Image (spheres, grey):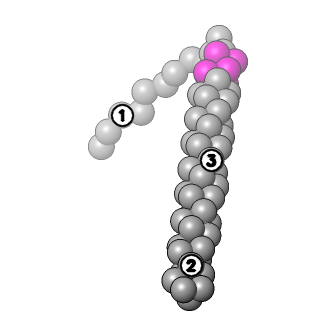
């Protein structure tokens, strides 16, 4: 059967690990926020272009029926 090794954790400091995890999570939030903003800008831009294209097409059709 395997032997259990004991570890002395009396001087173990968890603060550096917690700080590193906090920095990593802050970075992840910044990256996710930036990606969400960019996706929103792209979506709005494509929506505006689609709307403008539909307006141009509508005007072309109106011109066809006026003749």
Q: Which sits earlier in the primary sequence, circle 3 or circle 1?
A: 1
Residue in view at x 52 percent, y 21 percent: 7
Q: Which sits earlier in the primary sequence, circle 3 or circle 2?
A: 3
Front label number (3 vs 1): 3
Asked whether the viewer can see residue 43, the reply is: no
Residue at label 1? Answer: 3
Residue at label 2? Answer: 63
**Gap between marks 3 and 1, in whole Å?**
59 Å
Count every numbered label the image shows and give the total: 3
- Residue 34 at x, y = what percent? 62, 37
Q: Is residue 16 magenta?
A: yes
Residue in view at x 32 percent, y 39 percent: 2
**Gap between marks 3 and 2, in whole Å?**
33 Å
Mark 3–mark 1 CB contact (< 8 Å):
no
Residue in view at x 56 percent, y 68 percent: 56
Boundaries of the magenta span: 14-20
- Residue 24 at x, y = what percent? 59, 28
Furthest toward the front, the residue is: 67
Badge 1 marks a residue whose secondary structure is loop
Based on the displayed image, in which of its 4 quarters is residue 17 positioned? Answer: top right
């Amino acid at each position: 059967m395997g032997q259990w090794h004991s570890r002395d954790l009396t001087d173990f400091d968890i603060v550096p690990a917690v700080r590193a995890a906090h920095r990593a999570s802050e970075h992840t939030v910044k990256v996710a926020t930036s990606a969400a903003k960019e996706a929103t800008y792209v979506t709005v831009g494509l929506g505006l272009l689609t709307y403008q294209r539909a307006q141009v097409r509508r005007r072309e059709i109106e011109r066809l029926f006026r003749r």
